[in-house]
Amino acid sequence: MDIPTEMQHQAMGYDRAATMFSPDGHLLQVEYAEKTVRLGSSSIGLICKDGVVIAADRRIRDKLIAPESANKIFEIDDHIVATAAGILSDARILIEQAQVLAQQNRVTYDSPIEPIAAIRLLADKKQMFTQYGGARPYGVAILLGGVNKGHAHLYTSDVTGNYFAYKANAIGENDEKIKEILRKDYSEDMTIDEGIKFAMKIFKEILGKNFDLSRFDIGYIKKADEKMVRLHGEELKKYAK
């Protein structure tokens, strides 16, 4: 009887370290971490004609948790917002490092950091933990949006330390289903308000009867003022009609 390839790799120990390649060229610990990301709650990022917006599902399952303590929208600087899918404690450590870099940039150069510099730092940290032994990979994907010099930017960094710029993207649970909708219906001519409505419409379609406005965090930045605005709870009612 043929043994599945994954079981062969486990039997041979190729999944015991993030630095050990399997014979067919896979880093199995890294691939396991990617599966963790897909277990995380979904987030959607959109570049709009007047800025960038990120919508995140907090997926709070315990009514005893104070909702404001489970935010999934992180402010890296006034003009940069991020969210994550996967192990959020991993994300917190990475985000805090990006926040420090952003403040250092302001002190050193007296100017706001460029969004690509922030995502590059996050990606470099994640890549490091796929290359050195003694530590596991970061089990988190990060979606980062920002505005700089009148231009909106959206980046996604995966577990491996790769990052790419996007017009629209999704991470976490059901990411492929969401991306199919984005490929079909996303328009670069959307305003931020239209983008938020679009994101809520997608979540409503994906979540069905589990859709509840209290689940969501929204962060957006307009090109005009380059300041992050956060929305949640009752503030989202007008976007979910």
Image: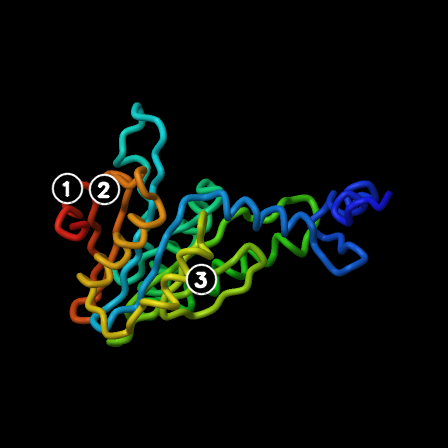
The numbered dot on residue 166 is none
Q: CA distance from mark 1 to mark 2?
A: 7 Å
Which residue is located at x 70 percent, y 54 percent?
Answer: 27
The amino acid type of the residue labelled 2 equals Leu
Where in the figure is residue 206, as x and y percent of width and height? Answer: 36, 48
Mark 3 burial class by Cα count in 10 Å: few <14, some 14-19, many 20+: many
| Extreme residue toward the top, this view | 64
Residue ID for mark 2 = 213
Q: Amino acid at mark 3?
A: Thr
Contact between labelled residues 2 and 1, with CB atoms less than 8 Å apart: yes
Colour style of the rendered protein structure: rainbow
| Residue where numbered disc 1 is placed | 234
Q: CA distance from mark 2 to mark 3?
A: 25 Å
> Secondary structure under badge 2?
helix
Q: Are marks 1 and 3 in contact (CB under 8 Å)?
A: no
Looking at the figure, which quarter contains the N terminus? top right
Answer whether residue 110 is visible to the viewer in this image.
no
Circle 2 or circle 3, nearest the eye:
2
Amino acid type at circle 1 is Glu
Q: Distance from label 1 to label 3 (Cα)?
A: 29 Å
Image quadrant assignment for residue 103 = bottom left
